[in-house]
Amino acid sequence: MIPYQALVEGLRTGAFCAELGAVYAADAPNQGQRLLRAAQLFADFFATDSAVELFSAPGRSEIAGNHTDHNCGKVLAAGVNLDAVAVAAKRPDLRAVVKSEGHELDDVVISDLTPVPEEIGRSAALLRGVCAGFVERGYAIGGFEAATLSDVLSGSGLSSSAAFEVLVGTILNYFYNDGKIPPLAIAQIAQYAENRFFGKPCGLMDQTACAVGGFVGIDFADTASPVIRRIDFDFAACGHALCITDSGGSHADLTEDYALVRREMEAVAAALGKRVLRETDRAAVLAALPALRESVGDRAVLRALHFFAENERVDALTAALAAGDFAAFCTLIKASGRSSFMYNQNVYNGRPANSQPVSLALALSETLLGEQGAWRVHGGGFAGTVQAFVPLERLDDYCAGMEAVFGQGSCRVLRVRPQGGVRLLK
């Protein structure tokens, strides 16, 4: 840990640029100024006579495996350079006090680790839930106070909630567990907090990508011990950039839409005597199709067919990357997007019918890129963002075209970040 004033001086003078560069690369000077802003936020709410630490957890981009993790499927995902950061200090009492920029102060008494109904959907629930997850697994917890900033914008499809959960878990890991808790355990605790305390029935993909970092393939056949494979692949080396465009659609009131995808997939599995779709296959669904249409409905069947095809695509995409076949990769990404639109049906929800910003962003991406690159819905869908792999020579035109419709700054060029949740200064 470092005295608060020494932290501020080091950030102000650039003394930490070399260490920050391990995570932020050439952007370390700018990130130093951002962290200085976090330090000032800390001083606005907490005493500065104690030692502090800097922590970071990335957002994530889902590459493929759209809505498969919650049914024990396969995904490709990547930690990205947009992150949540914290200036944090230990407290002598059992309180977790967090001031996030732009949000009200959360002050949670962590001697009580039962879910609080009034906290559902709030960051206080995530604080309490992460602490509860630590205790349930036999890890130590203690009080802390933190000021946080995040450029993983809420509703961006980059998993701002998972980044926050992993950030809290990383703080507790280093403050009270000597940094020895593995990233996968942090991810599972974060999912537990979101499911049990926050009230969102998410799968494990977001939290795993944020906690582990890098470009990863994840097989959730065994959710207690998913198989994680790091994939060493440089998109820029293939002459493409990863872009995310925020279409401006609101994520308000979409929790039920997300939950329905999972419930309908699991309803198909249950009708076949299974717990999740990973325990059955496409042939069984097709053989039972007349009965399934009657018992669970057409959309549930379509979503199940998406699940099986998407699992196969993840394997094919992994093989394409391993072979350096980026043309095949782009073809498969576009197929993933079509499946999400046609079968999983998570591109728009029809409320209101004349608002379909993600659909428009996909259509515009196809218009701007033609036969080049690839594009698909990003993340949970229904509103929010689209993902595109854009040839570098088309990048300026693509970003300008998307921002002409969706606003200045709506199109972001991302890079894959090798690190997951980390302590920034060693």
Image (cartoon, helix red, strand yellow):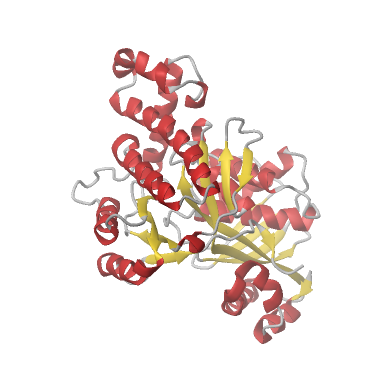
Q: Residue furthest right?
A: 178
Most foreground residue, 292 or 350: 292
Q: Which residue is at a point 70% across and 58% down the rendered structure image? A: 171
Q: Which residue is at a point 67% across and 42% down the rendered structure image? A: 133
37, above or below 174, in the image: below
- Quarter of the picture containing the C terminus is bottom right
Residue 116 appears in which quarter of the rendering? top right
Q: Position of residue 104 (x, y in %)?
A: 52, 63
Residue 42 visible in image: yes
Most foreground residue, 251 or 218: 218
Viewed as shown, does residue 401 lie left or right of 238?
left
Q: Which residue is at a point 67% across and 44% down the rendered structure image? A: 184
Q: How many marks?
A: 0
- Quarter of the picture containing the N terminus is bottom right
155, above or below 27, in the image: above
Residue 23 appears in which quarter of the rendering? bottom right
Q: Which residue is at a point 36% across and 14% down the rendered structure image? A: 287
Q: Residue furthest bottom?
A: 13
Residue 47 visible in image: no
Q: Position of residue 353 (x, y in %)?
A: 19, 46
Q: Position of residue 130 (x, y in %)?
A: 64, 47
Q: Position of residue 56 (x, y in %)?
A: 63, 63
Most foreground residue, 72 or 324: 324
Q: Residue furthest left?
A: 354
